[in-house]
Amino acid sequence: MRISHLPLRVSIGAFVLNSGMGKRSLEGEAAQGVHGMAVGAVPQLGKLDPDRFARLLSRAEIALGAALLAPFVPSALAGLGLAAFGAGLVQLYLRTPGMREAGSLRPTQQGIGLAKDVWLLGAGLTLVLDDLTHGRRRR
């Protein structure tokens, strides 16, 4: 890991890890709410039980947060995970009714919380691209 990646990886890694830890105990109505939103964006997730989905989401966030915080995980690999996670959240934003103003990408008040996740996608892609291009410059 490059030292210049440290602030990005630590700040986002701690946030994602904390989010995953907070979802460990999601059950019942809370799990159904998270699952329902996800199913609205990705209908195939409807095949999963809401409690199972919440557990899987929690574990995925914990793993991603830990990977970002672990200095031995290459930035390109951690960035790929972050970009995939961010892309999923952007898809949730784009496909959930009421998150955007009609005919626009601009978020509604309700959509601001999801619209900001585009930063996670951008940060993940930045880690990947910087790691890949930095390696080429050394050769």
Image: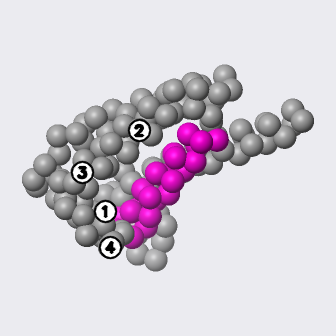
- Which residue position is annotated with label 1? 38
Please report the bounds of the magenta region as a residue range.
76-99
Residue 118 lies within the magenta run: no
Q: Which of marks 2 and 1 is nearer the N terminus?
A: 1
Mark 4 and mark 2 in contact (Cβ < 8 Å)? no
Q: Which of marks 3 and 2 is nearer the N terminus?
A: 3
Is residue 135 found left or right of 5 in the rendered image? right
Q: Which amino acid does label 1 sit on?
A: Ala
Mark 3 and mark 4 in contact (Cβ < 8 Å)? no
Residue at the extreme left of the image, as rendered = 28
Question: Residue 92, labelled with which disc?
Answer: none
- Which residue position is annotated with label 4? 43
Question: Secondary structure beneath disc 4?
Answer: helix
Label 3 to label 1: alpha-carbon separation: 10 Å
Up/down of 132 relative to 106, above or below: above
Label 1 Cα neighbours within 10 Å, binned few <14 / some 14-19 / many ≥20: many
Label 3 Cα neighbours within 10 Å, binned few <14 / some 14-19 / many ≥20: many
Mark 2 and mark 3 in contact (Cβ < 8 Å)? no
Label 4 to label 1: alpha-carbon separation: 8 Å
Question: Secondary structure beneath disc 2?
Answer: helix
Residue 1, horizontal then vertical, whole percent: 65, 27
Label 3 to label 2: alpha-carbon separation: 14 Å
Nearer mark to the viewer, of 2 and 1: 2
For image coordinates 33% across by 32% down, the residue present is: 18
User: What secondary structure prevails in the magenta region?
Assistant: helix
Q: Which amino acid does label 4 sit on?
A: Pro
Residue 38, horizontal then vertical, whole percent: 31, 62
Is residue 37 found left or right of 2 in the rendered image? left
For image coordinates 57% across by 32% down, the residue present is: 73
Is residue 70 found left or right of 74 in the rendered image? left
Question: Residue 63, labelled with which disc?
Answer: 2
Residue 92 lies within the magenta run: yes
